[in-house]
Image: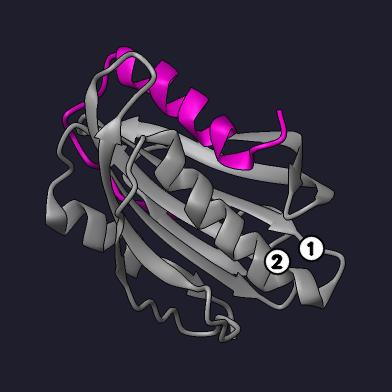
Amino acid sequence: MTRPTLLIAALVAASCSAACSPTLDWREFVPEGTDISVSFPCRPDRQARAVTVAGAKAQMQMLACNAGEATFALAFVDVADPARVGATLAELRATAASNLQDASPQNAPLQIKGMTPNAQAARLTIAGKLPDGAAVQEHAAFFARGLRVYQATVIGAKPAPQVVDTFIAGLKFAG
């Protein structure tokens, strides 16, 4: 698999068919080996997969869980070359939109305290379809800190705006 967000799409497709708890039990996690804190409404599972992104092979880590009829995920990948950070962010954004067959995602500026400024950092809202044809909305934040590139995602049939905002606002870097 060369498109890293296909991993996310596969997780979402599998997750959407699983039973979801309607209760959102927000809890803070700091993924091992990182300095980012993220609030999930459920206990996330961690997975890793080798990917090719922006022309370079890398190991992508992801935490994901399902709650309230949505999937919540934080994926991150370390980029070896500082010149590839912007290209990696751009490819993750483009792939997220193409995975849901959306040619015109809505872009909004993104600011997470402690992130490294980058012109490719953004918050996207994507309306599209899963591979099985089911309508879905994806809300994603793409950002970097140093040489680590992140994608935070909430995806579901129609995630509540306050739930999406709580997830994105829960992203914090130490220090």
Q: Nearer the viewer, residue 114 or 156?
A: 156
Name which quarter of the figure residue 125 lies in. Answer: bottom left
Residue 103 to residue 149: above or below: above
Q: Would residue 146 appear left or right of 143 to someone viewing this image?
A: right
> Which residue is more in the foreground, 171 or 123?
123
- Distance from Cα at disc 1 to Cα at disc 2: 6 Å
Q: Are marks 1 and 2 in contact (CB under 8 Å)?
A: yes
- What residue is shown at x 51% (from left), y 64% (from top)? 37
Q: Quadrant of the N terminus?
A: top right
Q: Which residue is mark 1?
A: 79
The vertical placement of 4 against 22, above or below, is: below
Q: In the image shown, does 29 or 61 lie closer to the viewer?
A: 61
Q: Is residue 71 above or below residue 40?
A: above
Tell which residue pokes out farthest to the front in this image: 103
In the image, is residue 81 above or below residue 29? below
From where the camera sits, is residue 21 visible? yes
Answer left or right for 11 relative to 57.
left
Q: Amino acid at mark 2?
A: Arg
Q: Nearer the viewer, residue 105 or 137?
A: 105
Q: What's the magenta region?
A: 1-29
The quadrant in which residue 132 appears is: top left
Residue at label 2? 148
Residue at 76 percent across and 60 percent down: it is 78
